Amino acid sequence: MCKDPQSSYIRWLIGFTFLILAVCASWNWFVDPYDMFGNTRIKDINQTKPVAESRERISKPYRILDVQPRTLILGNSRPELGLDPSYHCWPEAMKPVYNMAMLGTGLYENYRNLQHAVHQGRIEHLFLGLDFLFFVQQDDLIDPIQWNPPKRDLEHLQIFAHGNVNQYFEWHRLLNGFKALFSLQATIDSIRTVLSQGDPNAPTINPDGHNPGRQFLSGIAIEGQKVFFTQKNLEVAELLSQQRVLFQDGLRWSKPLETLRRILVLAISNDIQVTLFINPRHADFLNLIALSGKWSMKEEWKRVLTEIAEEHQAEVWDFHDFDEFSIPPAPSEAGKALVGFWEPGHYRSELGNAMINRMVGGEDCEILKVGTLLQPDEIEVHLEKLRQRQHKYVKVHNTEFISLKDLYARFVQ
């Protein structure tokens, strides 16, 4: 009896297809281009993760369940680049530290990520980076009593916004893991990951969630850091030239402030010690705030943060200042860069280390004069000192200030 050649071909084709899929899945699991599975990193094979940032909103929430940190860093790309969990001055009682800050995340997504992290976790310390532009917005005319988050969103997290458990979390984790193993894009990204291992400037995310900012190195080496500053200053000037409010419709309330309060309430209910910190900004950014007429709004924002922190037993540190890190102008020579900043809005881990030393560093760590702990009975003195430093900067660095003034004028004519 002769075998049906068509049936044999189909069986062979199916078998070959499954073999290819198995090989691709094994390859993608081994390389782990998105750091989805937390596999061992091998030098010259998969140590650098150049595409991990593209999937960090999915991978970081999964990784934190495996790391089970005592200290959690939240915020946007600024603390993601600036605060290094592996820095030796973190106190032993706070380790392990995990950096769950991510590119483009606002306060609401940080609130949701904290809900996820504390569920079946052991978080004891939270460091949350804050930005002035988080809090200035259009007047949305929302009733503060009726405002509430959606009942279902961000379904890759363990908890929904209202506190109910996401019964489909494991299914979503399985589905996202499947995509990371079997998709064509994952295979391409695995190949790209291996090919990038010899590039010292290839971007990456470390196992502890820290992005060391290597994506800036190539541009600085070719064009110089001044280009990054000019580009970012234009973006910030355009944003600051727009009409924005701190509070909604005359009330001392806004969605960002309400979200911050909910973060603090959640932390208190889980016995988490909270440290809020205002992300450092270069003098260019601070002067653009002054030029936009929003300096007094920034001061009121700091007053409100101080009140909220006091109310919820949290600390708040202000790293907006004209200091040794923020004052020097960006060098225009190719290959040269400031010690503290990649560009006006993103600070380097050298400045981040000084911030960690100031907030929690031990006796063996050098404490530089950066940052101020905001306290209700001293806030006005602090704000006056910053005003004086800004005025002094304008006098001493008038050329740089005039250049910024001309740049800002493009958006207000």
Image (cartoon, rainbow, N blue to C red):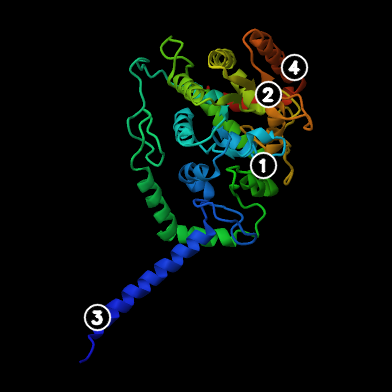
Q: Amino acid at mark 4?
A: Lys
Question: Does residue 287 show up?
Answer: no
Task: Compare marks 2 and 4 and give the one earlier in the sequence.
Answer: 4
Seen as rendered, the residue at the extreme bottom is 1
In the rendered image, the quadrant that contains the N terminus is: bottom left
- Could you say which is closer to the camera, residue 302 or residue 393? 302
SS at circle 3: helix
Q: Amino acid at mark 3?
A: Ser
Q: In the visual, does 281 lie left or right of 163? A: right
Q: Which residue is mark 2?
A: 402
Q: Amino acid at mark 1?
A: Ser
Task: Compare marks 3 and 4 and give the one earlier in the sequence.
Answer: 3
Q: Position of residue 261 (x, y in %)?
A: 48, 20
Q: Which residue is mark 3?
A: 7
User: Given this view, does label 4 or label 1 mark the residue nearer the observer?
Assistant: 1
Q: Position of residue 295 (x, y in %)?
A: 59, 16
Cα separation between marks 3 and 1: 58 Å
Task: Compare marks 4 and 1 and give the one earlier in the sequence.
Answer: 1
How many neighbours does mark 3 have within 10 angstroms: few (below 14), some (14-19), or many (20 or more)?
Answer: few
Q: Amino acid at mark 2?
A: Ile
Q: Which residue is mark 1?
A: 86
Q: Is residue 155 above or below residue 194?
A: above
